[in-house]
Amino acid sequence: YTMARLMERAGVPALLVGDSAGSVVLGHGSTIPVSLPFMIELTAAVRRGAPNAFLMADMPFGSYQASAAQGVRNVARMLKLTGCDCIKLEVARSHVKLVNRLSDAGVAVIAHLGLRPQWVGLLGGYRSQGKTAEQAKAIVAAAVEMQKAGAAALLIETVPPEVGAAVVAETEIPVIGCGAGPACHGSVIVTHDALGLTPTRPKFVPLLSKMDEPISAALAEYARRVGSGEYPAVEHQYEMSGEEKTKFLSGSKR
Protein backbone atom coordinates (compact mmCIF):
# COMPACT_ATOMS: atom_id res chain seq x y z
CA TYR A 1 0.00 0.00 0.00
CA THR A 2 2.65 2.52 1.02
CA MET A 3 4.92 1.89 -1.97
CA ALA A 4 1.96 1.87 -4.37
CA ARG A 5 0.76 5.20 -3.02
CA LEU A 6 4.19 6.73 -3.64
CA MET A 7 4.39 5.20 -7.12
CA GLU A 8 1.03 6.60 -8.19
CA ARG A 9 2.01 10.00 -6.80
CA ALA A 10 5.23 9.79 -8.85
CA GLY A 11 3.24 9.19 -12.03
CA VAL A 12 4.02 5.50 -12.58
CA PRO A 13 1.15 4.46 -14.89
CA ALA A 14 1.13 0.68 -14.39
CA LEU A 15 2.07 -1.62 -11.52
CA LEU A 16 2.75 -5.36 -11.54
CA VAL A 17 2.35 -7.18 -8.25
CA GLY A 18 4.81 -9.96 -8.98
CA ASP A 19 5.47 -13.20 -7.17
CA SER A 20 9.03 -11.90 -6.78
CA ALA A 21 7.55 -10.58 -3.53
CA GLY A 22 8.30 -14.08 -2.29
CA SER A 23 11.97 -13.12 -2.34
CA VAL A 24 12.02 -9.39 -1.60
CA VAL A 25 9.16 -9.34 0.94
CA LEU A 26 9.11 -12.84 2.45
CA GLY A 27 12.79 -13.75 2.06
CA HIS A 28 12.36 -16.98 0.10
CA GLY A 29 15.10 -18.14 -2.27
CA SER A 30 12.63 -18.43 -5.16
CA THR A 31 9.04 -17.62 -6.09
CA ILE A 32 7.87 -21.22 -5.68
CA PRO A 33 6.67 -20.98 -2.04
CA VAL A 34 4.38 -17.99 -2.74
CA SER A 35 0.71 -18.73 -2.11
CA LEU A 36 -2.40 -17.45 -3.83
CA PRO A 37 -3.87 -15.93 -0.63
CA PHE A 38 -0.64 -13.96 -0.13
CA MET A 39 -0.74 -12.62 -3.70
CA ILE A 40 -4.41 -11.68 -3.32
CA GLU A 41 -3.74 -9.81 -0.07
CA LEU A 42 -0.74 -8.01 -1.57
CA THR A 43 -2.53 -7.07 -4.80
CA ALA A 44 -5.54 -5.74 -2.92
CA ALA A 45 -3.22 -3.58 -0.79
CA VAL A 46 -1.55 -2.18 -3.91
CA ARG A 47 -4.96 -1.38 -5.40
CA ARG A 48 -5.85 0.59 -2.27
CA GLY A 49 -2.59 2.51 -2.52
CA ALA A 50 -2.85 3.18 -6.26
CA PRO A 51 -6.56 3.22 -7.19
CA ASN A 52 -5.94 4.88 -10.57
CA ALA A 53 -2.95 2.88 -11.84
CA PHE A 54 -3.26 0.02 -14.31
CA LEU A 55 -2.80 -2.98 -12.03
CA MET A 56 -1.43 -6.37 -13.08
CA ALA A 57 -1.50 -9.37 -10.74
CA ASP A 58 0.81 -12.38 -10.93
CA MET A 59 -0.69 -15.85 -10.54
CA PRO A 60 1.67 -17.86 -8.30
CA PHE A 61 3.04 -21.34 -8.82
CA GLY A 62 0.43 -24.04 -8.25
CA SER A 63 -2.58 -21.79 -8.77
CA TYR A 64 -3.19 -22.67 -12.44
CA GLN A 65 -0.94 -25.56 -13.46
CA ALA A 66 -3.26 -28.45 -12.52
CA SER A 67 -5.96 -27.74 -15.10
CA ALA A 68 -7.67 -25.01 -17.09
CA ALA A 69 -10.63 -25.25 -14.72
CA GLN A 70 -8.39 -24.67 -11.70
CA GLY A 71 -6.82 -21.70 -13.45
CA VAL A 72 -10.17 -20.11 -14.32
CA ARG A 73 -11.42 -20.50 -10.74
CA ASN A 74 -8.31 -18.97 -9.19
CA VAL A 75 -8.07 -16.15 -11.72
CA ALA A 76 -11.72 -15.28 -11.04
CA ARG A 77 -10.94 -15.23 -7.31
CA MET A 78 -7.95 -12.94 -7.88
CA LEU A 79 -9.99 -10.51 -9.96
CA LYS A 80 -12.95 -10.39 -7.59
CA LEU A 81 -10.95 -9.94 -4.39
CA THR A 82 -8.33 -7.45 -5.60
CA GLY A 83 -9.84 -5.20 -8.26
CA CYS A 84 -6.82 -5.74 -10.52
CA ASP A 85 -7.15 -4.97 -14.23
CA CYS A 86 -5.42 -8.06 -15.64
CA ILE A 87 -3.48 -11.13 -14.61
CA LYS A 88 -0.09 -12.52 -15.61
CA LEU A 89 0.71 -16.18 -16.26
CA GLU A 90 4.10 -17.80 -16.84
CA VAL A 91 3.10 -19.87 -19.83
CA ALA A 92 4.05 -22.90 -21.89
CA ARG A 93 2.25 -24.46 -24.86
CA SER A 94 0.06 -26.43 -22.46
CA HIS A 95 -1.49 -23.17 -21.26
CA VAL A 96 -3.01 -22.24 -24.63
CA LYS A 97 -6.37 -23.68 -23.56
CA LEU A 98 -6.34 -21.72 -20.30
CA VAL A 99 -5.43 -18.45 -22.01
CA ASN A 100 -8.19 -19.04 -24.55
CA ARG A 101 -10.81 -19.79 -21.88
CA LEU A 102 -9.84 -16.74 -19.86
CA SER A 103 -9.93 -14.55 -22.94
CA ASP A 104 -13.38 -15.90 -23.84
CA ALA A 105 -14.48 -15.00 -20.31
CA GLY A 106 -13.31 -11.42 -20.79
CA VAL A 107 -10.12 -11.62 -18.74
CA ALA A 108 -7.08 -9.66 -19.91
CA VAL A 109 -4.14 -12.07 -19.76
CA ILE A 110 -0.46 -11.16 -19.93
CA ALA A 111 1.53 -14.16 -21.16
CA HIS A 112 5.00 -14.32 -19.62
CA LEU A 113 7.74 -15.86 -21.81
CA GLY A 114 11.54 -16.03 -21.83
CA LEU A 115 12.98 -16.50 -18.36
CA ARG A 116 10.11 -17.80 -16.22
CA PRO A 117 11.11 -17.86 -12.54
CA GLN A 118 8.54 -20.57 -11.74
CA TRP A 119 10.59 -22.86 -14.02
CA VAL A 120 13.75 -22.34 -11.94
CA GLY A 121 14.01 -26.03 -11.09
CA LEU A 122 13.87 -27.06 -14.74
CA LEU A 123 16.15 -24.27 -15.94
CA GLY A 124 18.74 -24.91 -13.23
CA GLY A 125 18.78 -21.30 -12.12
CA TYR A 126 17.86 -17.78 -13.23
CA ARG A 127 19.50 -17.76 -16.64
CA SER A 128 19.03 -15.60 -19.70
CA GLN A 129 16.91 -17.26 -22.37
CA GLY A 130 16.80 -17.05 -26.16
CA LYS A 131 20.58 -16.94 -26.57
CA THR A 132 20.59 -19.57 -29.32
CA ALA A 133 18.78 -19.26 -32.63
CA GLU A 134 16.61 -22.27 -31.73
CA GLN A 135 15.61 -20.83 -28.36
CA ALA A 136 14.93 -17.41 -29.86
CA LYS A 137 12.68 -18.85 -32.57
CA ALA A 138 10.79 -20.87 -29.97
CA ILE A 139 10.11 -17.74 -27.87
CA VAL A 140 8.85 -15.81 -30.88
CA ALA A 141 6.67 -18.75 -31.96
CA ALA A 142 5.24 -19.03 -28.44
CA ALA A 143 4.48 -15.31 -28.41
CA VAL A 144 2.53 -15.61 -31.66
CA GLU A 145 0.70 -18.64 -30.30
CA MET A 146 -0.30 -16.81 -27.13
CA GLN A 147 -1.59 -13.87 -29.16
CA LYS A 148 -3.72 -16.27 -31.21
CA ALA A 149 -5.03 -17.81 -27.98
CA GLY A 150 -6.30 -14.41 -26.90
CA ALA A 151 -3.53 -12.96 -24.70
CA ALA A 152 -3.99 -9.22 -24.25
CA ALA A 153 -0.26 -8.55 -23.85
CA LEU A 154 3.10 -10.28 -23.52
CA LEU A 155 5.89 -10.02 -20.97
CA ILE A 156 9.31 -11.11 -22.21
CA GLU A 157 12.01 -11.58 -19.56
CA THR A 158 15.81 -11.69 -19.77
CA VAL A 159 16.40 -12.25 -23.48
CA PRO A 160 18.74 -10.60 -26.01
CA PRO A 161 17.32 -7.39 -27.54
CA GLU A 162 17.01 -9.09 -30.93
CA VAL A 163 14.49 -11.50 -29.43
CA GLY A 164 12.45 -8.73 -27.87
CA ALA A 165 12.45 -6.85 -31.18
CA ALA A 166 11.38 -9.97 -33.07
CA VAL A 167 8.45 -10.55 -30.71
CA VAL A 168 7.33 -6.94 -31.20
CA ALA A 169 7.61 -7.33 -34.99
CA GLU A 170 5.71 -10.62 -35.12
CA THR A 171 2.82 -9.69 -32.81
CA GLU A 172 0.21 -6.95 -32.62
CA ILE A 173 -0.34 -6.72 -28.87
CA PRO A 174 1.65 -4.76 -26.27
CA VAL A 175 5.00 -6.28 -25.30
CA ILE A 176 6.43 -5.48 -21.87
CA GLY A 177 10.14 -6.05 -21.53
CA CYS A 178 11.84 -7.28 -18.38
CA GLY A 179 15.41 -7.19 -19.60
CA ALA A 180 14.31 -7.67 -23.22
CA GLY A 181 15.76 -4.62 -24.96
CA PRO A 182 14.51 -1.19 -26.07
CA ALA A 183 12.10 -2.36 -28.78
CA CYS A 184 9.46 -3.39 -26.23
CA HIS A 185 6.52 -1.07 -25.67
CA GLY A 186 7.15 -0.82 -21.92
CA SER A 187 9.47 -2.07 -19.22
CA VAL A 188 9.06 -3.58 -15.77
CA ILE A 189 11.60 -4.06 -12.98
CA VAL A 190 11.50 -5.19 -9.36
CA THR A 191 11.21 -2.05 -7.24
CA HIS A 192 13.42 -3.33 -4.42
CA ASP A 193 16.24 -3.99 -6.92
CA ALA A 194 16.06 -0.52 -8.46
CA LEU A 195 16.03 1.21 -5.07
CA GLY A 196 19.09 -0.66 -3.83
CA LEU A 197 17.20 -2.65 -1.20
CA THR A 198 18.45 -6.08 -2.32
CA PRO A 199 21.98 -7.50 -1.96
CA THR A 200 22.30 -8.05 -5.72
CA ARG A 201 20.28 -7.02 -8.74
CA PRO A 202 19.89 -8.35 -12.31
CA LYS A 203 22.04 -6.81 -15.03
CA PHE A 204 19.07 -5.16 -16.72
CA VAL A 205 17.86 -3.27 -13.63
CA PRO A 206 19.06 0.35 -13.27
CA LEU A 207 20.11 1.47 -9.80
CA LEU A 208 17.84 4.46 -9.25
CA SER A 209 18.80 5.06 -5.63
CA LYS A 210 20.80 3.49 -2.78
CA MET A 211 17.95 3.69 -0.31
CA ASP A 212 19.35 0.95 1.91
CA GLU A 213 22.02 3.33 3.22
CA PRO A 214 19.79 6.22 4.42
CA ILE A 215 17.25 3.76 5.85
CA SER A 216 19.96 1.92 7.79
CA ALA A 217 21.40 5.23 8.97
CA ALA A 218 18.00 6.46 10.16
CA LEU A 219 17.31 3.27 12.10
CA ALA A 220 20.79 3.35 13.64
CA GLU A 221 20.08 6.92 14.78
CA TYR A 222 16.83 5.78 16.40
CA ALA A 223 18.65 3.00 18.24
CA ARG A 224 21.29 5.50 19.40
CA ARG A 225 18.70 7.95 20.74
CA VAL A 226 16.84 5.25 22.66
CA GLY A 227 20.08 3.85 24.03
CA SER A 228 21.33 7.26 25.15
CA GLY A 229 18.03 8.27 26.75
CA GLU A 230 17.43 11.14 24.31
CA TYR A 231 14.21 9.47 23.21
CA PRO A 232 11.46 9.73 24.25
CA ALA A 233 11.86 13.43 25.07
CA VAL A 234 9.25 15.82 26.50
CA GLU A 235 7.85 16.67 23.06
CA HIS A 236 7.04 13.00 22.47
CA GLN A 237 4.94 12.61 25.63
CA TYR A 238 1.22 13.04 26.35
CA GLU A 239 0.14 15.23 29.30
CA MET A 240 -2.51 14.81 31.98
CA SER A 241 -4.22 17.88 33.36
CA GLY A 242 -2.75 19.13 36.61
CA GLU A 243 -5.83 18.11 38.61
CA GLU A 244 -5.96 14.60 37.19
CA LYS A 245 -2.23 14.16 37.65
CA THR A 246 -2.53 15.15 41.31
CA LYS A 247 -5.39 12.71 41.86
CA PHE A 248 -3.48 9.92 40.12
CA LEU A 249 -0.20 10.46 41.94
CA SER A 250 -1.87 10.87 45.33
CA GLY A 251 -3.80 7.68 44.88
CA SER A 252 -7.20 9.44 45.18
CA LYS A 253 -10.17 7.76 43.50
CA ARG A 254 -12.39 10.85 43.68
Image (tube, rainbow, N blue to C red):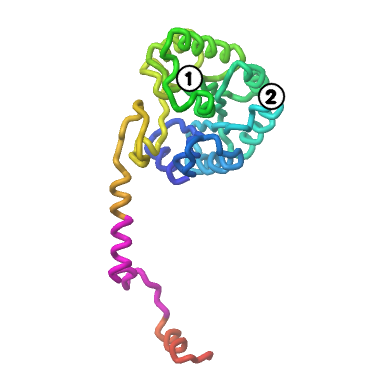
Q: What element carries label 2?
A: helix
Disc 1 from disc 2: Cα separation:
22 Å
User: Extreme right residue here?
Assistant: 69
Foreground residue, 180 or 152? 180
Q: In the rendering, at what x and y percent does residue 35 appear?
A: 59, 39
Residue 39 vs 131, above or below: the answer is: below
Residue under pointer 2: 68
Residue 92 figure quarter: top right
Query: Which region shows up in magenta?
Result: 219-240
Residue drawn at (57%, 21%) of the image: 91
- Picture coordinates of residue 83, whole percent (x, y): 58, 36
Image position of 53 with respect to 246: above or below: above
The answer to whether residue 191 is above or below residue 88 is below
Residue with the most extreme front position: 124
> Would you name the residue on which mark 1 appears?
114
Determine which of the numbered discs, if any, sits on residue 38 in the image.
Answer: none
Q: Which amino acid does label 1 sit on?
A: Gly
**Does the stretch in magenta take in 193?**
no
Q: Sort mark 1 into few (<14), some (14-19) or many (20+) by Cα contacts within 10 Å.
A: many
Q: Which of marks 1 and 2 is nearer the N terminus?
A: 2
The answer to whether residue 78 is left or right of residue 168 is right
Residue occupying image coordinates x 51% and y 20%: 113
Q: Nearer the viewer, mark 1 or mark 2?
A: 1
Q: Residue at x 35, y 29 (%)?
A: 205
Asked if residue 224 lies in the magenta stretch, the reply is: yes
Residue at figure coordinates x 50%, y 23% from the top left? 123
Q: Where is residue 222 in the image (x, y as percent from the top left)?
A: 32, 61
Residue 128 at x, y percent in the picture: 42, 21
Indicate the secondary structure of the residue bearing disc 1. Answer: strand
Q: What residue type is labelled 2?
A: Ala
